[in-house]
Image (spheres, rainbow, N blue to C red):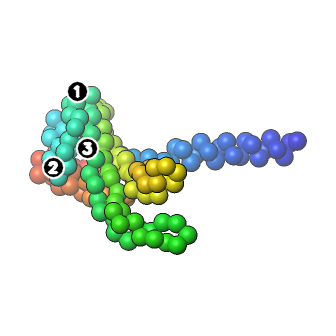
Amino acid sequence: MQFNLYLILLLMVATVAGCASLGGVQERYAVCAYDQVWGASLDSLIDREVLVKDQENGQIETNWLEIPMPGRTYGALQREIVDSRDRSRLIVTLKRVRDVTKVSLAEERQRWGWRGGSRMFGWIPTDPSNEMIRSVLMKLEMKLKERGCSLT
């Protein structure tokens, strides 16, 4: 009985820790005025369509961007998915923290894949791309440097 209690407790802790690590959110701090960080954030997303620009609440959200992903297969016979692709959207959140601005960047990513059932193929949630997040953070850092600011 006591062993089962320890096992349940261990599973609960593992589940909470696992959920907390999901999402791929990257946080940085910009030593700069909020308005400058806002402008640099928008400039770093210039290659995407921005749907939400709420400067007062510090929210920027992009539209889905589809990315071709050739070579993916599915099923026991490993058939190639002809129209294989991912789609990605970015969420940037800015928050004033004393003399700095906290920048949070998250990517929501889905892949086109085998779902089975009547829909056969569809969008399936997948892990964020570290390369995509790193690329956007590098653009943001460059845009901030152009404004005389730094990202830590």
What residue do we see at 11% from left, 47% from top?
147
In front here: 80 or 1? 80
Q: Where is residue 68 in the image (x, y as percent from the top left)?
A: 29, 63
Location of mark 3 (residue): 63
Q: Which circle marks residue 46 in the picture?
A: 2
Give the mark, 1 or 3, whose residue is nearer the N terminus.
1
Give the spatial CA distance, label 2 vs label 3: 12 Å
Specify few, some or many for label 1: CA neighbours under 10 Å numbering under 14, 14-19, or 20 or more. few
Which kind of residue does numbered mark 1 sit on?
Answer: Glu
In front here: 55 or 115? 115
Which kind of residue does numbered mark 2 sit on?
Answer: Ile
Q: Where is residue 138 in the image (x, y as percent from the top left)?
A: 24, 57
What residue do we see at 28% from left, 55% from top?
66
Location of mark 1 (residue): 56
Visible residue check, residue 29: no
Q: Position of residue 5 (x, y in %)?
A: 80, 41
Specify few, some or many for label 2: CA neighbours under 10 Å numbering under 14, 14-19, or 20 or more. few
**Quarter of the image holding residue 9?**
top right
Give the mark, 2 or 1, whose residue is nearer the N terminus.
2
Which kind of residue does numbered mark 3 sit on?
Answer: Asn
What residue do we see at 25% from left, 38% from top?
60
